[in-house]
Amino acid sequence: MTVFAVVLAGGQGSRLGDVRKAELRLGGQRLLDRVVTRLTGEILVSAGRGPQYAGYTCVPDLPGLVGGPLAGLAAAVLHLRGTAKPGDTLVSVPVDTPFLPADFVLKLAAGVTSESAAYAAWGEEIYPTNAAYRFGAISDLPERADSLGSPKRLLSALDAKAVRWEINHNPFANLNTLADLVSLARRVE
């Protein structure tokens, strides 16, 4: 089994003043680079319709699809169709989760059973964009992404299971506001 990963980095960053989250820095390091350090295998970056990121294989959103994380996942699936086998795993992660656990890919990929998917959970919270999918279960995603609408609905359709992390600090805390940026910056110090 081969593991592929896609960083979902095509969002607008509207609550942060329309900034590209991938370019924000914590501890002197871009969010994109921080997230990539926790991933393995072939890594794709879903850049939406925005700029490309040097040094990374970037996949644009598919024409006609409304943006969002599911559009980014669908773009990655289309890109991998000639490479990935049905039993391979595709891990998705949003670019604004800078504190992924060291065992993120290994533990999440282990939670995927044949023709299934798994998503990250911490405490009472679930994180549908931090997920792993058996490629065969989502190989038709580009054709049905619009009807599904969200990663949460896709995971529900696949009867995905939660993979829980029991650690003190939320490893999936994400960055949507200036207050989030300040809070996450404190964790770096």
Image (cartoon, helix red, strand yellow):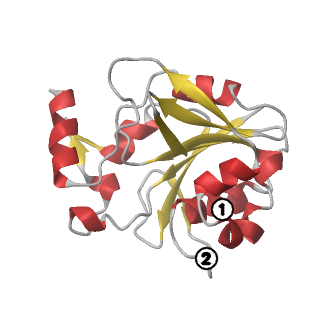
Query: Would residue 147 be found to the left or right of residue 68 on screen?
Result: right
Check the image and name the residue furthest to the front: 124
Residue 180 against residue 153 in the figure, above or below: above
Instruction: Answer whether residue 73 is visible to the viewer in this image.
Output: yes
Res. 168 image quadrant: top left
Return the disc, 1 or 2, that comes first in the chain's sequence. Answer: 2
Image quadrant where one finds the N terminus: top right
SS of the residue under disc 1: helix
Amino acid type shown at disc 1: Ala
Rendered location of residue 108, percent (x, y): 61, 29
Q: Disc 1 vs disc 2: Cβ atoms closer than 8 Å? A: yes
Mark 1 closeness class: few <14, some 14–19, many ≥20 residues within 10 Å:
many
Res. 161 image quadrant: top right
Q: Which residue is mark 2?
A: 65
Amino acid type shown at disc 2: Leu
Residue 85 against residue 76 in the figure, above or below: above
Rendered location of residue 74, percent (x, y): 66, 62
Q: Which residue is mark 1?
A: 74
Residue depicted at 14% across the width and 43% down the height: 182
The CA span between labels 1 and 2 is 9 Å
Rendered location of residue 183, percent (x, y): 18, 38
Check the image and name the residue furthest to the top: 167
Which of 21/124 is in front? 124
Question: In this figure, what is the number of numbered marks?
Answer: 2
Residue 64 against residue 96 in the figure, above or below: below
Query: Would residue 32 be found to the left or right of residue 72 on screen?
Result: left
Residue depicted at 22% across the width and 62% down the height: 16
SS of the residue under disc 2: loop
Residue 62 against residue 114 in the figure, above or below: below
Residue depicted at 47% across the width and 63% down the height: 47
Instruction: Answer whether residue 39 is visible to the viewer in this image.
Output: no
